[in-house]
Image: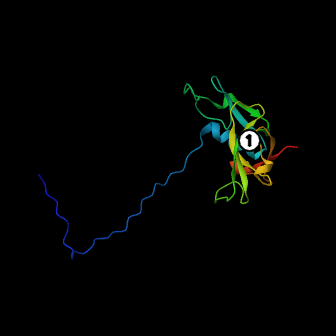
């Protein structure tokens, strides 16, 4: 049996600087790379899955069977759709799509079977509703990043 005694009260405290980091850059792979390249051209791609229909954003594996999906399975969907569910963000945080109050929404784009998450720019929570039609607002200068879709806005 080992007995551990606390150090004496007058023992010096040992200190050492320690930085814990995990430097990692995710590679996109061919499917997500194609999705991102298409955004630069104001196009949104989904991927046809045998079990989930058209998934947006595209995944590299079928969500139910884990079968590999390839760029051959990519299909273009519309940049318009409908809000499936939403929540209001009264105080945006750094990294949010907008720096003014907005809604985070699950949006099912026309031609897609699954919704994607993005911001919706409206004047307040009373202007949001499940089922409302929305359209992508594209960045003026696009670089192949999800930020190429600035946000969605009502499609009147």
Which residue does the numbered mark 1 point to in the structure image?
Answer: 38
Element class at badge 1: helix
- Name the residue furthest left: 1
Quarter of the image where one finds residue 6: bottom left
Camera sees residue 144: no
The quadrant of the rendering that contains the C terminus is top right
Q: Is residue 117 above or below residue 98?
A: above
Give the class, few, some or many, for how many residues have Cα within 10 Å of label 1's Cα (few <14, many ≥20): some
Residue visible at 61% across and 29% down in the picture? 69
- Name the residue furthest bottom: 10
> Where residue 129 sits: x, y (%)?
77, 43
Which is nearer the eye, 138 or 29? 138
13 lies left or right of 44: left
Q: Is residue 92 above or below residue 110?
A: below
- Name the residue furthest right: 156
Residue visible at 21% across and 74% down in the picture? 9
> Where residue 12 sits: x, y (%)?
24, 75
Which is nearer the eye, 93 or 150? 93
Residue visible at 45% across and 58% down in the picture? 21
Residue visible at 57% across and 26% down in the picture? 64
- Name the residue furthest top: 50
Q: Is residue 13 above or below residue 126?
A: below
Camera sees residue 16: yes
């Amino acid at each position: 049996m080992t007995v551990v005694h606390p150090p004496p009260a007058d023992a010096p405290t040992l200190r050492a600087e320690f930085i814990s980091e995990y430097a990692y850059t995710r590679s996109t792979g061919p499917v997500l790379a194609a999705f991102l390249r298409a955004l630069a051209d104001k196009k949104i791609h989904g991927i046809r899955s045998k079990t989930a229909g058209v998934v947006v954003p595209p995944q590299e594996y079928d969500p139910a069977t884990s079968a590999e999906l390839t760029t051959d399975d990519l299909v273009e969907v519309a940049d318009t759709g409908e809000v499936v569910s939403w929540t209001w963000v009264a105080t945006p945080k750094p990294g949010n799509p907008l720096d003014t109050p907005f809604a985070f929404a699950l949006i099912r784009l026309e031609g897609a079977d699954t919704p994607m998450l993005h911001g919706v720019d409206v004047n307040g929570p009373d202007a949001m509703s499940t089922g409302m039609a929305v359209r992508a607002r594209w960045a003026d200068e696009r670089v192949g990043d999800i930020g190429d879709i600035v946000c969605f806005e009502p499609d009147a």
